[in-house]
Image (cartoon, grey):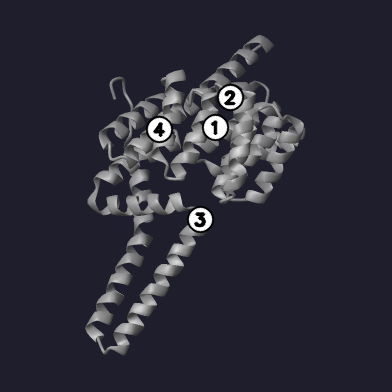
Amino acid sequence: MNDYELEKWWHYARQQMAQGNSSGALESLRRILSIDPDRAEAHALLALVLLDQRRMHAAQHEANLALALEPELPLAHYANAQVLIAHRQFKAAEAHLKQLLAMDALTPTYYHSLATLYRITDRNEEIWPLLEKALEIDPESPDTFVVIGEYYLEQGNLKQAQEWAFKVLQLEAEHHDGLILMGHILLQQGQVESAREHALWALRQDPDNFKAQHLITAVKARQNLVLGLWWRYNTWMGALGEGRAILILVIAFVIYRIAIIVAGDFEQAILAGIIHVVWLIIVVYTWIGPVIFRKSLKKEIESVTLKQGF
């Protein structure tokens, strides 16, 4: 394979990744690295592909390798930041992203990533300035529109989220993350069948993409009586943010303890017993809900085979 062919496969890999086709990108990058195993940018992009497929340890290995091969490569820092976010090592991820912005302040993707990090860590007041900067750099970026839509979705503002999702799909009808964003919005609006169609549309592009698999499993959970209740609870708690969600749980526990004490003071042993049993059911349900959901997701991943006309 000559230099021209290497660059051709590199172009294919970047294009496939942009289209959400992580499986295709994986094969293209394997071709490149079989000929040029020390190409740092290929290792960095491979880390992002593996992260899309939730192959966490392999992604971390590739990101570290990219940085070791070329410590000043922006893509290597970006890949490391994404892997660290996935591992919830937020301070280390933030350090990489800030270093990236010091190296290159004109790439919207870096602002997207830092905004996502701040969203995860409930630093909401710091998010919008980053998104405004990304819009200033590229006012017609569908990727920026997706991040803004996700921001509003997590805030529980479905109207604004949907407006930004429409902007994405108007610019690029098959934008992978745009389809997934719209699917989640439709699901929260109760339009389950439309959400399913968007999930399948995204899966046609990349059957191995975790976000698309997660959406189709969420659709199935929404249709299931037991999992549907947990899905609504989880969505509501997620919209509150980590800090407020913890506060809600603490308040709920205090109310439960007060109810038990009051029932005891009035010698209502049966009522106290009922309250205690209800509380245990709620606790167990919130514990087993994620387990059942993960099993459902795993089953979906194993069972989904995509064909023409899927």
Give the distance between the C-alpha atoms of the residues marked 2 and 3, in whole angstroms: 37 Å
- Which residue type carries mark 2? Leu
Q: Quadrant of residue 31?
A: top right
Count of labels in the image: 4
> Do the numbered discs 4 and 1 sit on residues whose CB atoms are within 8 Å?
no
> Do the numbered discs 4 and 3 sit on residues whose CB atoms are within 8 Å?
no
Q: Nearer the viewer, mark 2 or mark 4?
A: 4
Q: In the rendered view, would you say 170 is above or below 57?
A: above
N-terminal of the two: label 2 or label 3? 2
Give the distance between the C-alpha atoms of the residues marked 4 and 1, in whole angstroms: 27 Å
Q: Which mark is residue 162?
A: 4
Residue drawn at (42%, 54%), measured in percent from left and top?
A: 237
N-terminal of the two: label 4 or label 3? 4
- Residue of label 2: 29
Q: Which mark is residue 49?
A: 1
> Do the numbered discs 2 and 4 sit on residues whose CB atoms are within 8 Å?
no
